Structures are given as structure tokens and as C-alpha cells.
Image (cartoon, grey):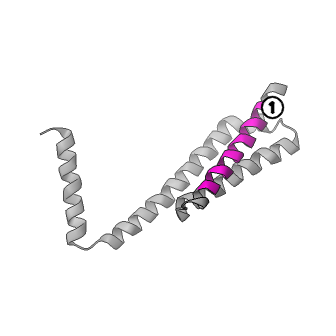
Amino acid sequence: MTPFVRNLLILAAVAVVIVVFNQETALATASTLIRFAFFIVIGVVAYFFWRDVARREIELWPSRQQRLFYSAVGLFVVDLGWFLFAHPQARDALAFFIVAAICVYVAVRTWLDQRRLT
């Protein structure tokens, strides 16, 4: 038996157990907890990257550029959290992508401008 077939059989067995024991609520709860944990892990990784790499460089920037960069990053985090927990559709999803694109553009443009000046 190939590993692919074995993994499909394991997945099917788990699905059957969930349906037979009527554990859809527990599965939804676990899914919500995993979603929260994923968002927290993304934040922790971003914080460690900032602390180890970017903080010393950003401290050398003028205060206006620092506020602009941190505001763009903060708005992006709020936008991403809204997208992960609200599951927007149609216009709301479009608004997410537009706001995210603007935040990324502002942050990258500020970083590149400051990098060019040093």
C-alpha cells in the first residue's frame, strides 16, 4: 500500500469517526482554536523578525517614516485578522485585498526610500 492511499484511508477513518459520534461541534471548536493559534504564531514570528533584524535599522529613520511604517504594518495586521475571522465575501474581500495592497506598498516604499538614503 502506498503512503498516499494509507493517508487517504486514515483521513476517511477520522471523518467516519467524527460523523458517527456526532462531533461536528468539537471539530468546529478545534478549528477556531487552531485559527487563533495560527494568527498568534504569525504575530510571534513577525515580532522575532522585527526584534532580531529590523528594529535597529528602523530606529535610525526619521520619526515620521517610523510612524508611517509602523502604522502600515499595524493596519495590515488588523486587516489580516479581520480577513481570517470574518471570512469576507465579494466587496468585503475586495476591500481586504485593496487595504492589504496599500499597506504593503506603503511599508515597502518607506523601507526602500530609507534604505536608499543610507
Q: Where 58 sits versus 89, above or below?
A: above
Q: Where 3 sits versus 37, above or below?
A: above
Q: Which residues are magenta?
A: 94-114
User: At label 1, which amino acid type do we have?
Assistant: Asp
Of the pair 42 and 92, the residue shown nearer to us: 92
In the rendered image, the quadrant that contains the N terminus is: top left
Q: Residue at x 80, y 26 (%)?
A: 116
Of the pair 9 and 49, the residue shown nearer to us: 9
- The answer to whether residue 112 is magenta is yes
In the rendered image, the quadrant that contains the C terminus is: top right
Image quadrant of residue 14?
A: bottom left
Judge left or right: residue 79 versus residue 56: left
Q: What predominant SS class does the magenta segment belong to?
A: helix
Of the pair 10 and 56, the residue shown nearer to us: 10
x, y percent for residue 47: 63, 46
Q: Where 89 sits versus 106, above or below?
A: below
Q: Residue at x 76, y 51 (%)?
A: 71
Judge left or right: residue 3 versus residue 52: left
Q: Is residue 87 visible?
A: yes
Q: Is residue 118 visible?
A: no
Judge left or right: residue 87 versus residue 22: right
Say which residue label 1 marks. 113
Q: Residue furthest front?
A: 90
x, y percent for residue 51: 67, 41
Q: Secondary structure at mark 1?
A: helix
Q: Residue at x 20, y 56 (%)?
A: 12
x, y percent for residue 8: 21, 49
